[in-house]
Amino acid sequence: MACCSKPATDATEKTEANAKFASLSNDPAFREKHENPLPFNLQEQTGKMVSYKTPDGKTASAYVIKAKEETDNYLFVIHEWWGLNDYIKKEAQRLAQELGNVNVIALDLYDGKVATTQEQAGQYMQAVSEDRAKAIINGALEYAGENADIATIGWCFGGGWSLQTAIMAGDRAEAAVMYYGMPEQNVERLKTLHAPVLGIFASQDKWITPKVVDEFKENMKQAGKKLTVKMYDADHAFANPSNPKYKAEFAEEAHKMAVNFIKEHLME
């Protein structure tokens, strides 16, 4: 399958994993795994949308939940293929509440576009420019500041970008959580990672397969980096309540694991 093509081997391919994941939008089976989300409007918003400058001379937007007390702890939340919708904002608020004193920034890698259908989501994910996505992330890193301690979390499309964001954060990165996202395959790039990683995957996933996960384990071992993997007997996107393959018990267990992992490495 497209997502399992040869590993990246040079600097020009260093984020090839995300490009390969984006190409899955052309796979009808992949699209069908993501049923259109039910309409949802987040009534009680504890955060607000903010704009910030990006290195490419543009601006980006993010949903930001400020900590009650001043802190350098930040959690970057990266949306799945639907975009920064109210479901992601709700999840960001839940994480902010459970983690405690942390600033939460839910990034928008789609520049304001939010999909409500499989077709839209596929188009938006496919259209993401590597350069623009990195500019949005680098702008958010600048927004957080040079003294920030950063954790990342993301699902599906955002799972791969969660890992990439942690790599881009350099020594400011403290933890990375990725749900069934495409792992980085370039060992040399993984060597630049400073944060431990929690990878949450599904054994029935036909794209981020157990084989892909095993290769990720080996690559992280070669890079000398810490990786914790939790594999559930579930399908891709099992943690998404709008997915027919949703597994509530697994999703809740994985969420608690993610929160504890972030607390251990970011908050303590």
Image (cartoon, rainbow, N blue to C red):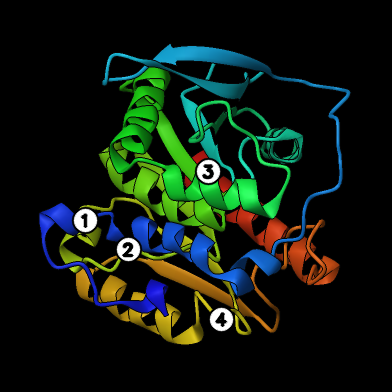
Q: Is residue 239 left or right of residue 148?
A: right
Q: Nearer the viewer, residue 150 or 216?
A: 216
Residues marked 1 and 2 touching at CB (< 8 Å): yes
Q: Position of residue 127 (x, y in %)?
A: 43, 44
Q: Is residue 232 above or below residue 55?
A: below
Q: Earlier in the sequence, mark 4 or mark 3?
A: 3
Q: Determine the residue positioned at 59% across, 43% down.
A: 79
Residues marked 4 and 2 touching at CB (< 8 Å): no
Q: Earlier in the sequence, mark 4 or mark 1?
A: 1
Q: Determine the residue positioned at 56% across, 58% down.
A: 156
Q: Is residue 186 left or right of residue 206?
A: left
Quarter location, residue 106: top right
Q: Which residue is mark 3?
A: 124
Q: Which residue is mark 1?
A: 14
How many other residues sit within 10 Å of disc 1, few (<14), some (14-19) or many (≥20)?
some
Give the residue type at disc 3.
Answer: Tyr
